[in-house]
């Protein structure tokens, strides 16, 4: 007689899956409730929620942009520099060159895609590690930013910027800031691309084992270039949005967005689908960061609390990702050891003469 499996290991496995997959989402809800109870007059208000959605739209876009190369096992450290260059270039074309704002935005977005493709070509065909390659190209972007601005700010004239351009950031839809819907639309597009299309499956295979991906016929170089191109395209869009928000060209803006973007992307890899970069996990991670930063800001934290929070969260994210990977390896090894013994687990039949 074969014994039925004990429900306790099954419950433990289910509990571990729920905690690992949705623990960060629960943390976001918990943080919101804690700050709402602590700051009932200011935190759970419509104005505060709108402010969080608006202020965190650009970090969310960058985090989603960083997620795509990470899915392929690459890192794009140029996104902060690219953001600064894109927003300065938009201001330069509109204010100093007199371009129509739609044309200026289109050129900058396409330029972001081209710069992303260059990153991919350098990494894949120059055979340079993505950390080093994108750090180098990012420094070059920063040099171009300084050259365009000559180290100063680009300030509009007395008439200001076109209202339609600033409306890209300032407008509202259904009572919420329009930038929140940009993030929602990009999340939907990337979720379909990464989770439902062959492109996403190829990127995940390349990220997990590029040699095996090449053996099965996946053009690894091409798809890695696609990933960097998508990242650059998203950075270009974020640069346009940043220009509409700042309404000045500031050469020093951009680098402070780099760390939050990677914190969101890496922390997102520990939730929803733990162990791999995923779009929904990135959005949840950005929500945790946004709620946490808004809460500690309203509690009167000092200016250094923001980098402390981002840096500490990044360390926690990397630590959780490593722990999750080691746990999966141990689980797989345990399953492999038990599999050969399973046929002999049933008690032997009694023989009768």
Image (tube, rainbow, N blue to C red):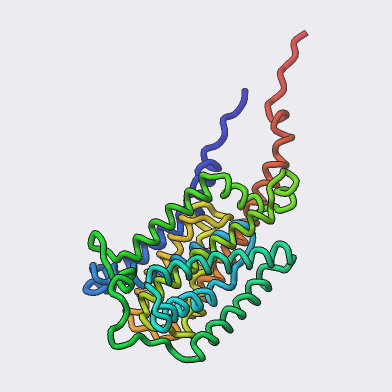
Q: Is residue 172 above or below residue 141?
A: above
Location of the C terminus by quadrant is top right
Say which residue appears at 26% left-offset and 61% top-offset. 173
Q: Is residue 295 left or right of residue 265?
A: left
Counting from the top left corner in percent of width and height, residue 349 is at: 71, 18
Q: Residue at x 39, y 82 (%)?
A: 95
Give the tally of numbered discs. Answer: 0
Determine the image quadrant of residue 60: bottom left
x and y percentages locating residue 268 in the rendered image = 50, 60
Residue at (52% x, 52% y) in the render:
273
Tell me if residue 37 can be seen: no
Res 318 → quadrant: bottom right
For the point 48% across and 56% down, the residue is 279
Foreground residue among 260 and 69: 69
Location of residue 59 with respect to 7 vertically, above or below: below
94 left or right of 269? left
Q: Can residue 276 be seen?
A: yes
Instruction: State the image coordinates of residue 72 (x, y, percent, origin top left).
Output: 62, 57
Hey, which residue is sitting farthest right in the picture?
353
Instruction: Answer left or right for 26 relative to 135.
Output: left
Give the camera-side residue of 161 and 293: 161
* The image quarter in which residue 137 lies: bottom right
Name the quadrant of the N terminus.
Answer: top right
Coordinates of residue 67 in the picture (x, y in percent): 54, 61
């Amino acid at each position: 007689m074969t014994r039925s499996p004990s429900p306790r290991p099954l419950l433990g496995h289910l509990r571990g899956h729920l905690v690992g997959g949705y623990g960060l989402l629960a943390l976001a809800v918990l943080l919101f409730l804690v700050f709402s109870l602590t700051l009932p007059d200011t935190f759970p208000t419509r104005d505060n929620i709108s402010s969080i959605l608006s202020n965190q739209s650009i970090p969310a876009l960058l985090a989603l942009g960083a997620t795509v190369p990470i899915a392929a096992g690459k890192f794009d450290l140029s996104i902060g520099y690219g953001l600064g260059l894109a927003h300065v270039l938009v201001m330069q074309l509109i204010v100093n060159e007199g371009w129509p704002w739609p044309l200026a935005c289109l050129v900058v977005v396409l330029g972001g895609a081209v710069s992303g493709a260059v990153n991919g070509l350098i990494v894949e065909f120059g055979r340079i590690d993505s950390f080093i390659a994108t750090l180098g190209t990012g420094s070059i972007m920063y040099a171009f930013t300084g050259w365009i601005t000559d180290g100063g700010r680009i300030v509009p004239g007395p008439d200001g910027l076109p209202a339609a351009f600033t409306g890209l950031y300032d407008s509202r839809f259904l009572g919420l800031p329009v930038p929140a819907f940009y993030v929602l639309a990009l999340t939907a597009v990337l979720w379909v691309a990464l989770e439902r299309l062959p492109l996403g499956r190829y990127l995940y295979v390349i990220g997990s084992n590029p040699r095996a991906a090449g053996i099965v016929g996946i053009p690894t170089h091409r798809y890695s270039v696609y990933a960097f191109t998508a990242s650059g395209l998203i950075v270009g869009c974020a640069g346009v949005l940043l220009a509409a928000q700042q309404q000045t060209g500031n050469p020093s803006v951009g680098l402070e967005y780099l760390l939050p973007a990677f914190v969101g992307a890496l922390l997102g890899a520990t939730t929803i689908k733990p162990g791999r970069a995923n779009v929904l996990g990135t959005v949840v991670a950005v929500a945790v960061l946004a709620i946490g930063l808004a809460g500690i800001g309203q509690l009167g934290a000092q200016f250094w609390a923001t980098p402390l929070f981002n840096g500490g969260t990044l360390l926690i994210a990397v630590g959780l990702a490593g722990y999750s990977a080691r746990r999966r390896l141990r689980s797989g090894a345990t399953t492999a050891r038990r599999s050969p013994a399973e046929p002999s687990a049933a008690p032997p039949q009694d023989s009768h003469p």
